[in-house]
């Protein structure tokens, strides 16, 4: 139950003075439906209205508050588009107030000729004449206090003016009350952080532009609150899932032994380490919730297979869930190859399987004849019944929602519990792992299988496109297959589809019919067809927007061209480059850049040339990332933070993690005074799922 003190925070915005149905609707689109959504709607700028020069002193455009006497009105003749103009002066110079689409009556009432007014707004010099369009404030001298000296500026919202937004946020803040302190007093003191309420008000009342800095104390405090709520909720969920009963699987049985003997290679130390960590979980009678993180090509599949064999040799079944049809079939093929000689049965099930064949498969699954089932979402459809599912492996786990993971988990045998192994090829920095996957244990494949040739990465100016195309001729003669990635499109340009189509047409002209195109607007089967043609070698060049599926394996592809590489984040560049260098051939990655104006872009290109270590690249990515470039992390399932910015505040995450851990050690059910305050925090930050796992909830 949400604490009563928070009720007003969760009221609808319509309940605020000055917010009617129409405004509430507009607000909902950009800010949210509830009062507290406005709390997190932070100003992005400030307007300083303290500048009060004489009109005669004004030499350039600026924000001013001036005391003037109103002069003549110059009303436009009816039915013309001319603005309404009002003259005013202060004895040193004249200024013209300009109103477009004005109601004359209103202006005459507001600005009677001969009276004094305080006017605040942006004055501009136009043909040597001072003029101000639509002043922000026009008040009588006794209402000086109605004009704020410093005014926060909120992100623009279609249909709601800055002034109105300011008023609405102020009305919301009037509902905010001081809350019991949930911070550790020592931490609060060390950091010099204000109380929550004080911090919230201060963020919305910046005294100058400096106070908009994300690193200022008020914003850091609120960001910390958010991380703490996040870490505490994850810790609660994790504690709960650890308590859940699972089953002890046999990890030492004959199938695993035989597989390892049959493998044409030795496992890397990293693989051995991860397998040991997973086995410890599998052998334990509580249920496993573990993430296997490892770059493309680091050998996750065999690790997954070994875990699945543990389930099979324990007399149960395993399932491997992949995000796409192509990936599911690719997994199926490689698993089939690996289990050659083992007496087990693997099957594949996707949305494409229908009719009799599907019925037969489902019957074999229910009777336990199928040991391992690979597939897409089809794996957890209603009529799919397992004989005894003990382990689910989820590949590219961030591509699945929580409900989907739950639906799969629900396929386990009632009362038996189920183990889950999630996998991702998106390496994310350690600190961020805490917030994205804090509810899981993490194993990392940091080492690549030996014998892999490094990808020769070069950066080349787009001006040299002709040379690049010529070099492709040579590569094709040598039997290469080529990916050509079209750029992310900037706002001013046409759509990325159009750009890709142009490039496709151009390359087709040069290289003939062996060029293919895939893009995001294509339907699944259509896309699959082109990808398959490329995989089979019927196409030599694949032009693509960034839709190439992570994990798709075409070992013969040895050239990756990325156009306007400077527009991609490091994580993305790394993922794209991971498509090549998978076979025995020597691979190249050509990063074509348009404009390396920014230092960040240059730094990214340099890192790409220097390393292929995904974990290192992820750390650098976080360090370099400019605001608004969160694409890479968004893809990897990072939660969206309302207040905190990963760019500026991620160093608070480990502190929050340790804090949360200590809290649950000393007050496991959040019942002491700080514990109660922390419950309020969890509700405030809408991280309250964890609360139902507390003994006194
Ligand atoms: P990931 O799924 O992590 O991208 P894969 O499991 O597809 O990587 O493995 C990539 C390639 O490396 C596969 O061809 C696989 O057979 C091979 N491989 C895996 N482990 C080893 C190893 N220890 N030694 C040599 N090759 C390996
Ligand atoms: Mg894989």
Image (spheres, rainbow, N blue to C red):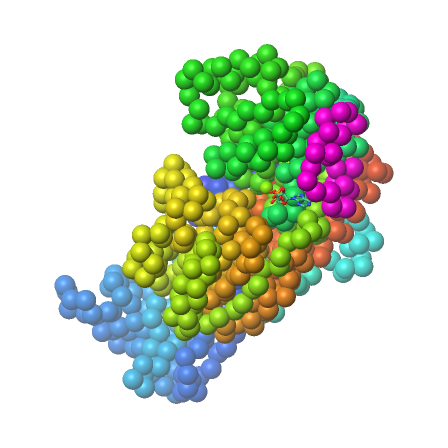
Q: Position of residue 502 (x, y in %)?
A: 31, 58
Tell me, yes or no, if residue 154 can be seen here. no
Q: Is residue 335 above or below residue 649?
A: above
Residue 370, quarter of picture:
top right
Q: Nearer the viewer, residue 624 or 533?
A: 533
Question: Can residue 74 be seen here?
Answer: yes
Residue at x 47% of width, y 82% of height: 53
Q: Nearer the viewer, residue 612 or 77?
A: 612
Q: Residue at x 52, y 16 (%)?
A: 362
Residue stretch rendered in magenta on the structure: 251-277
Q: Is residue 85 left or right of residue 410?
A: left
> Considering depth in this image, is 380 or 614 the residue closer to the camera?
614
Left or right, 62 with respect to 681, comes to left
- Residue 672, image quadrant: top right
Query: Residue 537 in the image: x percent, y percent?
Result: 43, 47
Query: Is 242 one of the magenta-colored residues?
Result: no
The residue positioned 47% from the left and 56% from the top of the image is 480
> Which quarter is ligand 1 in?
top right
Q: Which residue is at 80% across, 59% downward?
A: 190
Relative to residue 296, is residue 157 drawn left or right?
left
Image location of residue 514, percent across then percent down = 35, 52
Q: Position of residue 395 (x, y in %)?
A: 59, 37
């Amino acid at each position: 139950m949400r604490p009563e003190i928070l009720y007003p925070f969760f009221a609808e915005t319509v309940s605020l003075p000055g917010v009617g149905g129409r405004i509430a609707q507009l607000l909902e689109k950009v800010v949210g439906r509830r009062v507290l959504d406005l709390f997190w709607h932070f100003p992005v700028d400030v307007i300083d209205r303290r500048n009060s020069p004489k009109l005669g002193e004004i030499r350039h455009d600026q924000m001013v508050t001036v005391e003037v006497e109103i002069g003549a009105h110059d009303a436009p003749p009816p039915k013309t588009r001319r603005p309404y103009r009002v003259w005013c002066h202060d004895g040193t110079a004249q200024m013209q107030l300009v109103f477009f689409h004005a109601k004359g009556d209103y202006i005459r009432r507001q600005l009677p000729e001969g009276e004094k007014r305080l006017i605040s707004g942006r004055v501009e010099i136009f043909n040597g004449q001072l003029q101000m369009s639509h002043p922000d404030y026009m008040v009588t001298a006794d209402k000086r206090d109605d004009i704020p000296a410093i005014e926060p500026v909120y992100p623009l919202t279609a249909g709601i003016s800055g002034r109105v937004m300011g008023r609405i946020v102020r009305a919301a803040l009037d509902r905010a009350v001081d809350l019991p302190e949930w911070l550790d007093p020592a931490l609060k003191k060390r950091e010099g952080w204000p109380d929550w309420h004080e911090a919230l008000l201060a963020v919305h009342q910046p005294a100058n532009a400096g106070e908009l800095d994300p690193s200022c104390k008020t914003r850091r405090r609120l960001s910390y609150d958010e991380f703490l709520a996040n870490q505490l909720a994850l810790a609660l969920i994790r504690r709960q899932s650890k308590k859940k009963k699972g089953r002890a699987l046999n990890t030492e049985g004959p199938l695993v032994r035989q597989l390892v003997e049959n493998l044409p290679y030795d496992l890397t130390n990293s693989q051995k380490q991860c397998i040991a960590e997973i086995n410890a979980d599998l052998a334990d009678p509580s249920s496993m919730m573990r993430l296997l993180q490892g770059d493309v090509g680091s050998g996750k599949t065999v690790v997954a297979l070994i875990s699945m064999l543990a389930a099979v040799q324990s007399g149960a079944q395993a399932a491997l869930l992949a995000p796409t049809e192509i990936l599911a079939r690719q997994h199926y093929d490689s698993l089939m190859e690996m289990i050659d000689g083992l007496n087990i049965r693997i099957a594949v099930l996707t949305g494409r399987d229908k009719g009799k064949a599907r019925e037969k498969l489902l019957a074999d699954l229910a009777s336990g004849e199928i040991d391992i089932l690979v597939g897409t979402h089809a794996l957890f459809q209603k009529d799919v019944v397992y004989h005894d599912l003990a382990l689910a492996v989820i590949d590219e786990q961030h591509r699945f929602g929580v409900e989907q993971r739950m639906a799969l988990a629900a396929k386990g045998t009632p009362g038996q519990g189920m183990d889950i192994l999630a996998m991702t090829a998106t390496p994310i920095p350690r600190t961020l792992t805490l917030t994205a996957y804090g509810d899981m244990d993490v194993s990392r494949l940091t080492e690549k299988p030996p014998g892999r040739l490094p990808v020769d990465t070069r950066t080349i100016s787009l001006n040299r496109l002709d040379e690049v195309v010529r070099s492709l001729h040579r590569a094709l003669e040598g039997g290469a297959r080529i990916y050509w990635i079209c750029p992310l499109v900037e706002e001013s340009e046409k759509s990325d589809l159009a750009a890709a189509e142009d490039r496709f047409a151009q390359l087709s002209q040069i290289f003939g019919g062996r060029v293919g195109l895939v893009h995001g607007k294509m339907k699944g089967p259509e896309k699959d067809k082109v990808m398959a043609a490329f995989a089979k070698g019927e196409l030599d060049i694949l032009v693509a927007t960034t839709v190439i599926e992570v994990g798709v394996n075409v070992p013969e592809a040895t050239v990756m061209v990325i156009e306007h590489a400077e527009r991609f984040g490091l994580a993305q560049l790394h993922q794209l480059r991971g498509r090549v260098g998978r076979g025995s051939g020597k691979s190249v990655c050509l990063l074509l850049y348009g404009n390396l104006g920014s230092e960040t872009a240059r730094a990214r290109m340099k890192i790409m040339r220097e390393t292929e270590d995904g974990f290192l690249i992820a750390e650098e990515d976080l360090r370099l990332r400019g605001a608004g470039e969160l694409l890479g992390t968004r893809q990897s399932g990072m939660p969206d933070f309302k207040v905190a910015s990963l760019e500026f505040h991620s160093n608070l995450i480990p502190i929050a993690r340790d804090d949360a851990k200590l809290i649950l050690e000393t007050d496991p059910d959040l019942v002491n005074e700080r514990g109660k305050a922390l419950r309020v925090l969890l509700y405030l930050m809408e991280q309250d799922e964890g609360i139902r796992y507390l003994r006194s909830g």
